[in-house]
Image (cartoon, rainbow, N blue to C red):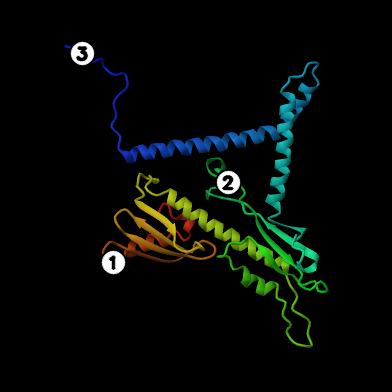
């Protein structure tokens, strides 16, 4: 009679839900370590002591063959640091260009505005190594002069999302109408247009990031040992102002969010379509959508 050798690997029975949670946790750890390695590499290449060590190594009689590769990496990092500094300090920059269309007005001359938006996936600015914090693809606003004899500008092309009130802002700050026959046209204010447009874009992405972060906190353990029983969090409209939250017990909540992410109205209905006043007050106590994770239990 054959006897089966004992297995050295302990047998564990894990449910698909726990395995998915473990896989998600491992992927998050890999992502965090990847970001940490990139941040430490950038700090090391930008350090003055590293450049001093490179200069001493270059002065050796027989320098290492890796010196040229290291010099190339340091120069690339320096260029990246300069670019990041410009993008961080100047959220909007202007440039001149030319429309290749041979029939374009004003001989194709255009004025472009490049708007930078920084991606802040986490609300805690001191834990930047644990999340995705990078520049988003820039937005472009191209303007031209329909009348070459006039300095007035109008929007030529743009990459602004449709949910951003660009036409409303343009009607306020790039108006080309004449108030009366005796008065001059209302002066345009391009700086105010760009400032308000960038504010709208920043608010839009901050609301979007808050909703995504809130969805990622669903069905996780909160401080104090409580369990977040949220099943799904998503934006109902394109502007990320109407948020729908669904709990595992069938309860559904709708949140109205203003331009700055403040909670304006909250309605929570259970499976029987009855109002959950206590949960509504608990959600409103967070005041902003970025602080909702600890109240969605």
Q: Is residue 47 visible?
A: no
Q: Which residue is mark 3?
A: 3
Distance from disc 3 to disc 2, alpha carbons, whole Å, reads 57 Å
Q: Which residue is mark 2?
A: 133
Q: Secondary structure at mark 2?
A: loop
- Nearer the viewer's eye, disc 3 or disc 2? 3
Mark earlier in primary sequence (1, 3):
3
* Residue drawn at (42%, 40%) of the image: 24
Q: Which residue is mark 1?
A: 274
Figure check: 114 above or below 9: below
Residue 29 in percent (x, y) is at 48, 36
* Residue drawn at (26%, 17%) of the image: 6
Residue 63 sits in which quadrant?
top right
Distance from disc 2 to disc 1, alpha carbons, whole Å, reads 41 Å
Residue 264 in percent (x, y) is at 46, 67
Residue 92 sits in which quadrant?
bottom right
Mark number displayed over residue 147? none
């Amino acid at each position: 009679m054959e006897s089966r050798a004992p297995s050295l690997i302990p047998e564990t029975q894990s449910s698909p839900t726990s395995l998915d949670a473990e896989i998600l946790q491992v992927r998050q750890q890999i992502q965090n370590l990847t970001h940490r390695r990139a941040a430490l590499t950038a700090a090391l290449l930008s350090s003055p002591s590293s450049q001093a060590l490179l200069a001493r190594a270059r002065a050796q009689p027989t320098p290492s063959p890796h010196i040229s590769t290291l010099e190339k990496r340091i120069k690339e990092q320096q260029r990246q640091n300069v670019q990041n500094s410009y993008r961080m300090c100047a959220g909007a920059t202007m440039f001149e260009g030319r429309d290749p269309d041979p029939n374009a007005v004003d001989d194709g001359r255009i004025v472009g505005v490049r708007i930078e938006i920084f991606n802040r996936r986490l609300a805690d600015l001191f834990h930047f190594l644990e999340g995705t914090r990078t520049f988003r693809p820039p937005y472009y606003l191209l303007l031209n002069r329909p009348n070459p004899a006039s300095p007035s500008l109008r929007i030529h092309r743009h990459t602004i999302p449709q949910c951003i009130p660009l036409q409303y802002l343009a009607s306020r700050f790039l108006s080309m109408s004449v108030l009366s026959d005796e008065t001059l046209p209302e002066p345009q204010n391009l700086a105010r247009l760009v400032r308000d447009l960038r504010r709208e874009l920043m608010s839009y992405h901050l609301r979007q990031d808050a909703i995504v972060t809130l969805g990622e906190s669903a069905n996780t353990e909160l401080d104090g040992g409580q369990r977040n029983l949220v099943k799904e969090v998503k934006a109902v409209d394109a502007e990320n102002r109407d948020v729908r939250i669904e709990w595992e017990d069938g309860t559904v909540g709708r949140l109205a969010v203003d331009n700055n992410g403040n909670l304006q109205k909250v309605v929570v209905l259970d499976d029987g379509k009855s109002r959950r006043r206590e949960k509504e007050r608990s959600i409103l106590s967070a005041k902003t959508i970025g602080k909702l994770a600890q109240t969605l239990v």
